[in-house]
Amino acid sequence: MQSQVIVALDGSTEAEAILPHALFIALQTQSVLTLLRVIMPPDEPGYGAQYIPDDWYAGEVSWTKNYLAGLATRLQGQGARVHIQHVEGTFAGAAINSYAEQHAGVQLIALATHGRSAGGRLLLGSVAGDVLASAPTSLLLLHPPKDRQLPPGPITQASYQTIVVPLDGMVGSERVLQQATRLALASHASVLLVADPPPPLLEQQVRAQEEMKEADFLADQAEQVRSSTGLTVQTAFTEGGPEAFIKRLQGQYRQHLLIVTLRQQAEHKVMSFLHQSNVPVLFVAL
């Protein structure tokens, strides 16, 4: 069965910012890149207003096909296999997840956390949370820089200098590390394993013992990755909280890929800085 990477688009330049990152993963996993746009069904009551032309639905379908075909042409120059698809849905998040559920080969859904086109087309940002909450597969999110557009011409795959992996011994850490390692090898990147320090309210001696345990855990994981892959692996604590830590990293490197587990705990930890940075976040499905 052919694997797919779905890219949810709404016609805005902000939503298109996810494309280089999705292209990278599609090429590395030899997956078809499916460009997906959700449009309102033809019998949607909201379109009964007099100022909406009778042929609005045909026009919307035609515009969507032309728009997605144009992006597909720009992506195919990189050797990607690209498929374009539109689906009907009143709620975009539910429509995106439904499409993924109906296609067993879907291994990733990629989308920007917000995007609005000048014509008021369907927002993706308003549904990113819905997709994350019930996505049947891994999810790649990006909060794109405001008003930044992809350069004209062929769309090239993203590159990464450092793959950042938050670890806390949670179930699924092994799978996250495996995914991070594959991506790091493919992009010739280093790996940074990070963990939150013990709570500051702990008694000083207890806190020191817990910090030593976490440091040993990170060091052990790092050595396993180094010995099995030859990758450069570093470890760190997220002093100052996730947001401050990511800002410091952005001052050292140009691009990062954060890899976390698709679970409630990881969601809260990562969402706290997702909207404060332009770092792509890959939520790995368990």
Image: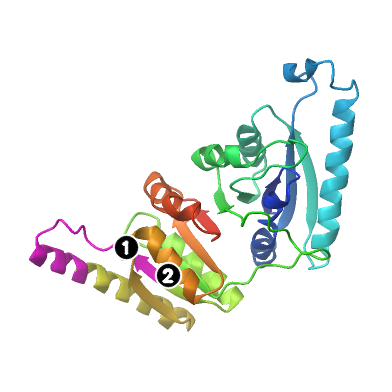
**Marks 2 and 1, the one that precedes in the sequence:** 1
Residue at numbered disc 2: 248
**Rendered residue at 86%/58% (across/down):** 73
Q: Secondary structure at mark 1?
A: loop
From the top left corner, tell me how far across and down residue 53 is, in percent: 89, 22
- Image coordinates of residue 110 in percent, x first then y, are 63, 51
Amino acid type of the residue tagged 2 in the rendering: Arg
Q: 84 above or below 90?
A: below
Residue 141 visible in this rendered orientation of the protein = yes
Per the rendering, the mark at residue 240 is 1
The numbered disc on residue 279 is none
Depicted 243 relative to depicted 253: above or below = above
Q: Amino acid at mark 1?
A: Gly
**Residue 14's spot in the image, x, y percent?**
68, 51
- Please report contact status of discs 2 and 1: CB closer than 8 Å, yes or no: yes
Segment colored magenta: 193-212
Q: How far from the left and from the top, in percent, is residue 282?
A: 53, 57
Residue at image position (40%, 51%) is 266
* Separation (CA) of disc 2 from disc 1: 10 Å
Figure colour scheme? rainbow
Q: Is residue 156 left or right of residue 250?
A: right
Q: Is residue 4 above or below residue 94?
A: below
How packed is label 2: few (under 14 Cα within 10 Å), some, or many (20 or more)? few
State yes or no: residue 196 in magenta: yes
Foreground residue, 120 or 139?
Answer: 120
